[in-house]
Image: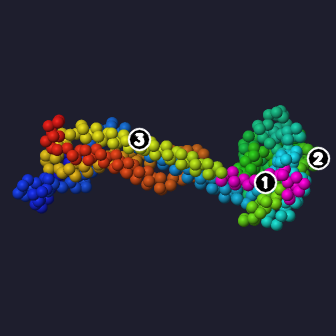
Amino acid sequence: MAVVQHSTKPVDAGDETAGRGSSIPRSRLRLGDIMRVGALGLRTRRLRTGLSTLGIAIGIAAMVGVLGLSASSQADLDAKIRALGTNLLEVQAGSGFGRGTGELPDTAVAMTSRIGPVTAVSSLTTVSADSGGTVRRTDTISEGINGGLSVFATDPGLLDTLHATLADGVFFDNATASYPATVLGTTAARTLGITDVADGLRVYIGGQWFAVIGILDPVEAAPGLDRAALIGLTAAETFVIGDDLAPETLYVRTVDGAVDDVRGVLAQTVNPATPEEVEVSRPSDALAAQEAASSAFTSLFLGLGAVALLVGGIGIANVMVIAVIERRSEIGLRRALGATRAHIRRQFLTEAVLLAGAGGLVGVGLGAAVTAAYARSQGWTIVIPPVALVGGLAAAIVIGGVAGLYPAARASRLAPTEALRSN
């Protein structure tokens, strides 16, 4: 039972706690008393409190988790876009209206480099397995066992054009691009059991031993390079193909602000005869589309979390109505001892808010933990927006307040004699 504080100030005859012509002190319920009285009902019905708290916690955890995972995913995508740059264009041979060959003209690189705003251009060509494009750790391994690795022929400028970096070793230069040397993608190196570049380290490509001179970090602009061995164009033509190679894909880096202008003339520049057979894309557009799709799913999951939170609020309202019915004698006794209707109303409203607030705290902690665990498993930066934490707790308190309004009003309307007699 809560402690009711009294003051010595006489009350008017109209006060509901005073008799006619009396000077009975006015009953007062201080903030500390309200908190103790509100928490009393929760402590005495722990199982019911736990289940009601769980309902709110699930809704809050869902909303915090969705916002946290969305922010972490967006931060990861933004980092990829910054690393990739929005001024990179990819040019490939397409089918168009004619009969595309899958290759670009031999003059594609030279013609593209003449475009004023173009700062760098590099070509990439797949060396097919039929032409010897297989990479193996030793020559004793069957050609059919290649771990799904590819072989690409490229030029020394690819690293700068893609803004790629090396985990170890060096990339091709004009000299090593003509010799049997290779740079491995990060997944290719791991598949071949190679962790770093060492003297004398070689792999077997197309019937020829190639020295491993470098290992790439993951390449955001061209993920296919992660599972590939790169060799120089001249080396591919000399040691593997035995013939000239036509470019298959061009990567073009432009001046910032000139991407659209360059994109508009690339097809005609690369293949003036049949520009419709040239496809020009911007790799960062795919990441931007992924980010937009992520935002759409975030809205959907937030809606589901709000539904769960609403269900939790209804559960609290139901629990509080039952509590009012079960505690009629307590209400009657408190009224008989001088508690006003406002005191009873505040008591049950505070109980509902404390119940929802506890669920909000649990939900915020659970949502943050789930976000951190999943983001860490994906290699993302862990980002939990402060608005998710503060907003989650505030939403729980508001839900508790709304859910407790009717039960609190119902409890305050009980007359002392009726409440005691009904028990």
**Which secondary structure, mark 1?**
strand
Crowding at label 2, few (<14), some or many (≥20) Cα neighbours within 10 Å? few
- Asked where in the image residue 416 lies, by quadrant, the reply is top left
What residue did someone put label 1 on?
A: 280
* Image coordinates for residue 131, horizontal then vertical, percent: 89, 40
* Image coordinates for residue 202, horizontal then vertical, percent: 82, 44
What residue did someone put label 2 on?
A: 243
**Cα gap from disc 2 to disc 1, whole angstroms:** 27 Å
Q: Which residue is drawn at 93% across and 49% down?
A: 244
Amino acid type, callout 2: Asp
Q: Do the residues labelled 3 and 1 touch (CB within 8 Å)?
A: no
**Cα gap from disc 2 to disc 3, whole angstroms:** 70 Å
Sequence-first tag of 3 and 1? 1
**Cα gap from disc 3 to disc 1, whole angstroms:** 50 Å
**If the image is split into quadrants, where does the C terminus sit?**
top left
* Image coordinates for residue 278, horizontal then vertical, percent: 83, 52
Q: Residue at x 14, y 37 (%)?
A: 421
Whether 285 is among the magenta residues is yes
Crowding at label 3, few (<14), some or many (≥20) Cα neighbours within 10 Å? some
Residue 43 visible somewhere in the drawing: no
Q: What stretch is highlighted in magenta?
A: 268-288
In the depicted structure, whether residue 184 falls above or below residue 23: above
Q: Nearer the viewer's eye, disc 2 or disc 1?
A: 1
What residue did someone put label 3 on?
A: 311
In the depicted structure, whether residue 328 falls above or below residue 217: above
Q: Residue at x 72, y 53 (%)?
A: 283
Sequence-first tag of 2 and 3? 2
Residue 384 visible somewhere in the drawing: yes
Q: Residue farthest to the left?
A: 21
